[in-house]
Amino acid sequence: MDNLTLIAICSIITAGLTIGIGVVGPSLAEGAAIANALKALAQQPDASSTITRTLFVGLAMIESTAIYCFVVSMIVLFSNPFWNYFVEKAGS
C-alpha cells in the first residue's frame, strides 16, 4: 500500500469519526433542551413566547456544533492539506 492510499483511507476514516462522534453530543443536548423546555412550558404556560424564543436560539447554537463537525469532515475529505504534499512527493 502506497502513501497516497494510506492518506485517502485515513481521511475517510477521520471524516466518518468526526461526523459520527461530533453529532452525538449536539443530539443529546437538543433532546435535553427540548425536554426541559416542555417542562417549563407545562409549569408556566404564560411565558411560552419567551421560552420558545430562547429554545430556538439555544437549538441554533447547539446545531452549529454539528455543522462545524460536518465542515471539518468535508475539509478532510475534499481539501486535505496532506494530499497535495504526498502527490508532489510521489511525482518527483
Image (cartoon, rainbow, N blue to C red):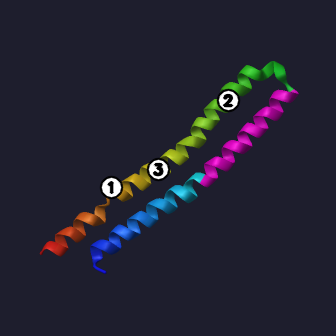
Pinpoint residue 48: horizontal percent, then vertical percent. Answer: 76, 22
* Residue 33 shown in magenta: yes
Q: Position of residue 84 (x, y in %)?
A: 23, 64
Magenta range: 24-43
Q: Which residue is mark 1?
A: 78
Task: Establish if 15 lies above or below 64.
Answer: below
Could you tell me which residue is drawn at 51 percent across and 55 percent down?
A: 19
Q: Is 44 displayed left or right of 87 in the figure?
A: right
The amino acid type, in three-letter code, at marker 2 is Thr
Q: Nearer the viewer, mark 1 or mark 2?
A: 1
Q: Distance between the Cα atoms at labels 1 and 2?
A: 36 Å
What element does badge 2 sit on?
helix
Q: Is residue 54 magenta?
A: no
Tell me how far mark 3 sits from mark 1, CA to CA: 12 Å
| Label of residue 59 in the image | none
Element type at marker 1?
helix
> Crowdedness of circle 1 by 10 Å Cα count: few (<14), some, many (20+)?
few
SS for callout 3: helix
Identify the mark nearer the N-term, 3 or 1.
3
Residue marked by disc 2: 54
Q: Quadrant of residue 5?
A: bottom left
Q: Residue at point 77% right, 39% down?
A: 35
Question: Which amino acid, by three-letter code, is at mark 1?
Answer: Phe
Crowdedness near tag 3: few (<14), some (14–19) or many (≥20) residues, C-alpha within 10 Å: some
Residue 37: percent from left, percent from top:
76, 34
Looking at the image, tell me whether mark 1 or mark 2 is earlier in sequence order.
2
